[in-house]
């Protein structure tokens, strides 16, 4: 079925914006966001050639032989990165039953549209933290077969038996007996030895990053949303094996103890972090651990929990209780000096709405410029790359633009109408 999913992705071809223009392009920006300094500059011209930024000049400059793009009424920013998405799915009241009715090919076709919406919202890169479709979607995008953001794909998340991301949760006894107990190949572990095998399996399948579910989760078909679900030794085995392959490790975590174990074991990012205590924050600061809040997902599930029938009854109280707390946790983490990077958990909420996370971050007391940095230069640090996240000579030509000034009014991020990825223009004002 995975082979069919690959064919589905290959069949979903978009003709526009799949290659960088061979002629140079001069973007005449009314304002330009300096991601390193965290400030908005006045008018600049960005010259792009062969997918890279050739030079950046102050003011509106005419470049002989270059195609001029008038963005004089716009603010230009490095393309944004969402560090937590799930492009293979999107929440709905049917999500739980669809897992029994749909094939990988169905999710593959859906992911094509989700990827395009994400790119058009201004997100030129994403980290997909869990989903078997995502490595194949990544490859299809890299081959120019479909339009979407650059993807760092985790593939199957690693869980413990009965934990968040155990694929057999909610399955009845007869079907569970037929399937057999999932193991490291399916991303379910119960020992350090299993943990090493599961990481190596993700390497075999072509993952770019490792994702573990260090605590219970909101949307899994299980009672606990915050209990620790790995021993510290198991997480250490994940991390040490991941390092052998050059992987970073992201840890889904809501509960305090599961977070503490994950941070102590050396994970790179904590996702969600709902019940993060001052002690955990201090440990994260000592270890240099990043926090990816995903406020959008928290608000989305808390809102949907109010609707009868949207979630199964085992999920509904978790969504109502945990989801509403994440924005406040992000506010406390920022005040405490924890390193924050941008992520939405989109796929829980609707793809293409990613930029609303900026608005929620600012509502939490995070300055607009800091929020923008979290999705540009800081996100590049999390990914471990130095060729994106800033508008500078030699970097990838990933550039987005919007009317207005998002440093002064963060709501401007919701109106992106220019998107360039690797020098290819995917959206432009009036197009």
Image: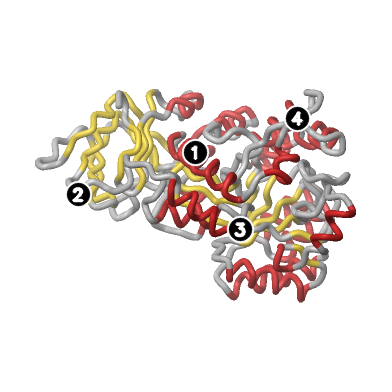
Q: Where's the C terminus, which quadrant?
A: top left
Q: Circle 1 is placed at which residue position? A: 113
Mark number for residue 22? 2
Query: Does label 2 or label 4 sit earlier along the sequence?
Result: 2
Determine the residue positioned at 24% across, 52% down.
50
Comparing marks 3 and 4, which lies closer to the viewer? 3
Disc 2/disc 1 C-alpha distance (Å): 27 Å
Q: Nearer the viewer, residue 123 or 269?
A: 123
Query: Does label 1 or label 3 sit earlier along the sequence?
Result: 1
Helix, strand or loop for disc 2: loop
66 to the left or right of 152: left
Q: Circle 4 is placed at which residue position? A: 302
On the image, the x and y values in percent for residue 51 come to 28, 51
Residue 238 occupies which quadrant of the picture? bottom right
347 to the left or right of 43: right
On the image, the x and y values in percent for residue 11 come to 43, 48
Helix, strand or loop for disc 1: helix
Q: Nearer the viewer, residue 314 or 28?
A: 314
Rendered position, 409 above or below 114: above
On the image, the x and y values in percent for residue 332 come to 71, 39
Comparing marks 2 and 3, which lies closer to the viewer? 3
Query: Does label 3 or label 4 sit earlier along the sequence?
Result: 3
Mark number for residue 7? none
Determine the residue positioned at 34% across, 46% down.
391
Q: Is residue 85 visible?
A: no
Rendered position, 20 above or below 178: above
Rendered position, 111 above or below 364: below
78 to the left or right of 345: left
The reply to whether the C-beta atoms of the residues labelled 1 and 3 are less than 8 Å apart is no
Query: Does label 2 or label 1 sit earlier along the sequence?
Result: 2
Q: Is residue 27 visible?
A: yes
């Amino acid at each position: 079925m995975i082979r069919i999913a690959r064919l589905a992705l290959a069949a979903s071809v978009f003709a526009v914006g799949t290659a960088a223009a061979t002629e140079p392009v001069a973007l005449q920006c009314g304002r330009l966001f300096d991601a390193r300094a965290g400030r908005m500059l006045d008018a600049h011209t960005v010259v792009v050639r062969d997918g890279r930024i050739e030079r950046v000049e102050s003011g509106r400059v005419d470049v002989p032989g270059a195609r001029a793009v008038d963005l004089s009424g716009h603010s230009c920013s490095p393309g944004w990165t969402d560090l937590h998405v799930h492009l293979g799915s999107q929440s709905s009241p049917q999500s739980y039953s669809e897992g029994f009715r749909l094939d990988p090919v169905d999710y593959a076709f859906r992911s094509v549209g989700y990827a395009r919406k994400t790119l058009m919202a201004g997100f030129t890169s994403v980290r997909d933290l869990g989903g078997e479709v995502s490595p194949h979607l990544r490859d299809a995008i890299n081959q120019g077969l479909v339009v979407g953001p650059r993807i760092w794909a985790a593939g199957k998340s690693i869980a413990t038996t009965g934990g968040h991301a155990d694929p057999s949760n909610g399955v009845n006894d007869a079907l569970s007996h037929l399937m057999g107990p999932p193991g490291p190949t399916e991303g379910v572990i119960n020992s350090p030895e299993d943990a090493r095998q599961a990481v190596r399996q993700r390497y075999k399948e072509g993952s770019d990053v490792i994702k573990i579910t260090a605590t219970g989760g909101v949307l899994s078909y299980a009672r606990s949303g915050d209990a620790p679900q790995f021993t510290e030794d198991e997480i250490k085995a994940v991390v040490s094996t991941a390092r052998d392959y050059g992987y970073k490790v992201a840890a889904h975590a809501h509960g305090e103890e599961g977070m503490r174990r994950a941070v102590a074991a050396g994970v790179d990012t904590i996702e969600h972090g709902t019940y993060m205590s001052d002690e955990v924050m201090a440990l994260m600061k000592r270890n240099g651990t990043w926090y990816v809040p995903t406020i959008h997902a928290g608000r989305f599930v808390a809102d949907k929990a109010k609707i009868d029938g949207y979630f199964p009854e085992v999920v509904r109280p978790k969504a109502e209780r945990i989801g509403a707390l994440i924005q406040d946790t992000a506010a406390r983490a920022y005040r405490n000096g924890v390193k924050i990077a941008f992520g939405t958990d989109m796929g829980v909420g609707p793809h293409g709405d990613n930029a609303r996370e900026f608005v929620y971050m600012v509502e939490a007391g995070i300055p607009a410029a800091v929020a923008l940095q979290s999705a540009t230069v800081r996100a590049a640090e999390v990914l471990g790359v130095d060729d994106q996240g800033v508008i500078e000579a030699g970097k990838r030509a990933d550039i987005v633009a919007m009317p207005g000034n998002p440093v002064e009014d963060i709501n401007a991020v919701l109106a992106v109408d220019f998107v360039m990825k690797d020098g290819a223009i995917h959206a432009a004002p009036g197009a």
